[in-house]
Image (tube, rainbow, N blue to C red):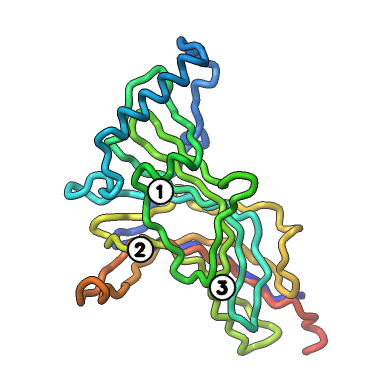
């Protein structure tokens, strides 16, 4: 048998973890059979006019509902692969699709089109969450053949922003019972600068989906499963003012078991 690996996703928040069941078509245009009134060329013109109007007085430096209520970020993660896991460097690698959804009332529009599907060129023109991975050592976005980013804007102001990331994250493996150890490795993410009073992260689903594990490079580890949870994290803000901030954060964790023949160590 092999040591087992468990991936845990945690949401750190000042509120109790709240996950809601969302229909799979929430991110899809349910009106797939809709017949557009506009011809393709007219649609292009219409989209250009919509975007120009939306961005005319838009200030991307300001989060949605600033001074009114916290901005709620619903998060989804799809795990493409995990591994390798290094017990020497105390780290692991994970490849994910990272999806964030929020509402920005400033981006509401009236049109025959329900959704605007846009490429990465639009990302730098609107406000997006300042999400960071707190225990990452290195991280990179995928850019081949184009930036692996997708932006969708619904006519009610809902935003979906997805991107593909490969992250090398810290994992403090406890090897006290080697080779019989079981380990849990987190992926912790949150806002970089907003406290929980201004930004709240929550899981869109109760579970995290993953690709086929046959191609995962876990080598001496056996994969045990994924978990997503919610907690509260305290971070220092001494570089701004001498106070402590409670940030709304998420953590993704997985469990592993060391793949060594246990009978040899009986």
Which residue is tagged 3?
Answer: 184
- Of residues 94 and 125, the one nearer the viewer is 125
The answer to which image quadrant residue 237 occupies is bottom left
Mark 1 element type: strand
Which residue is tagged 2?
Answer: 192
In the rendered structure, are the residues bearing label 2 and label 1 in contact, judged by CB atoms less than 8 Å apart? no
- Marks 3 and 1, Cα distance to the nearest angstrom? 24 Å
Task: Tell me what residue is drawn at x 46 percent, y 12 percent.
Answer: 38
Pointer 2 local density, CA inside 10 Å: few below 14, some 14–19, many at least 20 = some
Q: Tell me where residue 162 appears, x and y as whole percent.
A: 50, 46
The quadrant the C terminus occupies is bottom right
Mark 3 element type: strand
Q: Tell me where residue 87 appears, x and y as whole percent.
A: 64, 81
Which residue is tagged 1?
Answer: 74
- Of residues 120 and 33, the one nearer the viewer is 120
Mark 2 element type: loop
Nearer-N-terminus badge (3/1): 1
Pointer 3 local density, CA inside 10 Å: few below 14, some 14–19, many at least 20 = many
Q: Tell me where residue 94 appears, x and y as whole percent.
A: 60, 63
- Marks 2 and 1, Cα distance to the nearest angstrom? 16 Å
In the drawing, does residue 124 fall left or right of residue 194?
right
88 versus 230 height, above or below: below
Q: Nearer the viewer, mark 3 or mark 1?
A: 1
Q: Nearer the viewer, mark 3 or mark 2?
A: 2
The answer to which image quadrant residue 234 occupies is bottom left
Q: Tell me where residue 106 appears, x and y as whole percent.
A: 27, 36
- Marks 3 and 2, Cα distance to the nearest angstrom? 24 Å
- Of residues 165 and 57, the one nearer the viewer is 57
The quadrant the N terminus occupies is bottom right
Pointer 1 local density, CA inside 10 Å: few below 14, some 14–19, many at least 20 = some
The answer to which image quadrant residue 109 occupies is top left
Total tally of numbered discs in the picture: 3
């Amino acid at each position: 048998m092999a040591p087992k690996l468990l991936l845990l996703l945690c949401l750190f928040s000042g509120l109790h973890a709240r996950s809601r069941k969302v229909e799979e078509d929430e991110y899809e245009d349910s009106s797939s059979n809709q017949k557009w009134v506009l011809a393709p060329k007219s649609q292009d013109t219409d989209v250009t006019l919509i975007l120009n109007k939306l961005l005319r007085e838009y200030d991307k430096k300001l989060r949605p509902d600033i001074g009114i209520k916290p901005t709620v970020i619903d998060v989804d993660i799809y795990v493409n692969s995990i591994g390798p896991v290094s017990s020497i460097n105390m780290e692991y690698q994970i490849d994910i699709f990272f999806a964030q959804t929020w509402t920005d009332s400033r981006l509401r529009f009236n049109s025959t089109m329900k959704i605007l599907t846009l490429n990465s060129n639009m990302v730098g023109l609107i406000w997006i969450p300042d999400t960071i991975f707190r225990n990452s050592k290195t991280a990179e976005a995928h850019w081949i053949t184009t930036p692996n980013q997708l932006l969708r804007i619904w006519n009610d102001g809902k935003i979906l922003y997805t991107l593909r990331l490969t992250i090398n994250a810290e994992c403090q493996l406890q090897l006290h019972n080697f080779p019989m150890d079981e380990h849990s490795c987190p992926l912790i993410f949150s806002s970089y600068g907003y406290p929980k009073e201004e930004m709240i992260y929550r899981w869109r689903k109760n579970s995290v989906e993953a690709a086929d594990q046959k191609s995962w490079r876990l080598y001496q580890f056996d994969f045990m499963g994924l978990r997503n949870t919610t907690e509260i994290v305290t971070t220092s803000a001494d570089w701004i003012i001498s106070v402590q901030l409670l940030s709304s954060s998420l953590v993704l964790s997985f469990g592993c078991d060391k793949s060594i023949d246990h009978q040899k160590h009986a």
